[in-house]
Amino acid sequence: MPNRPDPPAEGAALSAAAPEMPAPHKPTRLQALSALWTIRGDLSTRAYWTLAGIGLLVPLLLWTLLAAFGTVNKIFLPGPLDVVLRLGHWYTDDDLMGDIGISVYRVVAGWALSALIALPLGLYIGTYRSVQALLEPLTDFIRYMPAVAFIPLVMLWIGIDERSKVAIIFIGTFFQMVLMVAEDVRRVPLAQIEAAQTMGATRSEILEKVILASAKPALLDTLRVTMGWAWTYLVVAELVAANSGLGYAIIKAQRFLQTDKIFAGILLIGAIGLAIDQAFRLVHRLSFPWLNPRGDA
Amino acid sequence: MSARQGAAGPLVECRGIYKVFGAGAAAVTALRNVDLEVGEGEFVTVVGASGCGKSTLLRVIGGLETYTAGRILVDGKAVRAPGIDRAMVFQNYSLYPWLTVTENIRFTRCLSAHTRNRTTASVEAALGRSDALIRLMGLVPVAHKHPNQLSGGMQQRVAIARALMSRPRILLMDEPFGALDAQTREVMHDLILHVSQLEHSTVIFVTHDVEEAVYLGSRVVLMAPRPGRIDTIYEVPLPVHRRQEMRQSPGFLQLRSQILGRIRETAGMKTDFELLQSLSRQASDA
């Protein structure tokens, strides 16, 4: 064998003979910058949070500057401070927590109700072609109908109590959710199902122990995404004879041209949504550690 | 070794199997009049150009695909659906990523087909069986890992162990090493030969790799495409216990090139040297 290095002295550990790694290359400023533009490249945690911070703070700064020095009327664009002050008033005088509570209840109830029906239904649509043929075209048809347009019908059929608000959120969420669940179920690799068949699994065992188990991470993601959609229907739902809730507060503020309250309501919905979304992601990470194994996970 | 082989004849018997996909003008005959007998304890490999129906044949025997005409008998009984007597090993994506290696291998134990009439003794036997398989397949160091922490070769070891768990009469393997690199593949060849002899398994092994087919099989079934059919069945002139150096033996090399040549003929694939030469002449003229 040519160019073979001298064998290490007898008894010497190979690692002792191996040379130390030389000092790592220090990237130049230009290289560091171009690393940000690597297609699908990696990004250090620090760089990620720096950029995320910039992405959140710059719009806030622009908003502050525009409100403070701009010639924009406060009616059109209240400053961040106005919004914070309004939030304070809302909390002390206007039962902010009550509004948040009732809105969270409506969204979660509408979403949970649709999940309760969409999960089994989607499981069957995604598993059996016959159920798919029976129900999917219908669902596809209904999901294009605007939820807002159902308001008069919902009021007629259900009334104007709490159930009607939940119903609007249900209508807005359910039909999309069914189709997404069915798609998640269809994405379970056929080999996983066929392997179970050759191991003697019955139909119900395959549904429960293979298809449902395999689709769980995707299903949790679908629940997370549809929760976001449920929130977008909140304002619509609280158009229906509501006298409380974040959506209702926004609609009422519109009547009195309280732009700062509209801002506060919108930002609050965004913040609650973000918190719920992060909670879902946390549950996802904790429930399915095998998706991102690190060493001896 | 073949203690159970009685007067009943072959373990697997395919008689005049037809498989037609689609109907009318779009109908495609995937299998035409396929006759095949596989004896107890035999290791049969199936090769052929793509589209020759070798995977379809395996899936039909496994009960994962229906057949249009003919009959398949396993141990004298007609086969129409999957069953625990025929375990299947797929090329990939068949392991359950949410279970550990051990849990994957023991998956059959949580199915009702295996828990009927279960006694404490049989539970213990099953646990012993899975431990033995984990040792046999060299999976002890990774027994508590999840499949996506393993290399492709290790994943296939798990898939084989899981298939063997319920002591199937027949092991159906559909290009199980097709996605592995050449070195890993050679290791797996000796492993599967060793294990199948130890377990007295009857194996039907589909592959597109002729070298693999000759090295593993006691017989090589060559299938031809359009329509899918059995072309030739070759006896492999090698001793039962294969060793890597046999890959260089004249008998091995001769059979391999014979089969390769026949596959090219049946698939209508020819390296057109005149065309290549005229093309390179044009290129150099330009």
Image: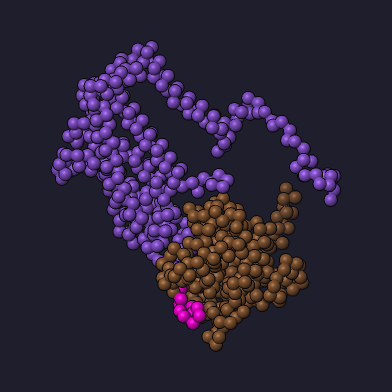
Chain colours: A purple, B brown
For the point 60% across and 66% down, the residue is B207
Residue at the limit of the structure toward the front, as seen here: B120
Image position, residue B199 (x, y; %): 59, 72
For the point 42% across and 19% down, the residue is A62
For the point 47% across and 26% down, the residue is A53
Q: In this picture, is A204 found above or below A223?
A: below
Q: Is residue A188 magenta?
A: no
Image position, residue B107 (x, y; %): 48, 62
For the point 35% across and 42% down, the residue is A226
Residue at the limit of the structure toward the bottom, as seen here: B7
Displayed quadrant of residue A271: top left
Q: In this picture, is B183 found above or below A5?
A: below
Q: Is residue B73 magenta?
A: yes
Residue A185 visible to an observer of this rendering: yes
Residue B20 visible to an observer of this rendering: no
The image shows a total of numbered marks equal to 0
Image quadrant holding the N terminus of chain B, namely: bottom right
Q: In this picture, is B185 found above or below B41?
A: above
Image position, residue B154 (x, y; %): 60, 57
Q: Where does the magenta region start and end? A: B65-79
Between A267 and B268, the one nearer to me in the picture: A267
Image position, residue B216 (x, y; %): 65, 70
Between A95 and A131, the one nearer to me in the picture: A95
On the picture, is B215 further left or further right than A165?
A: right
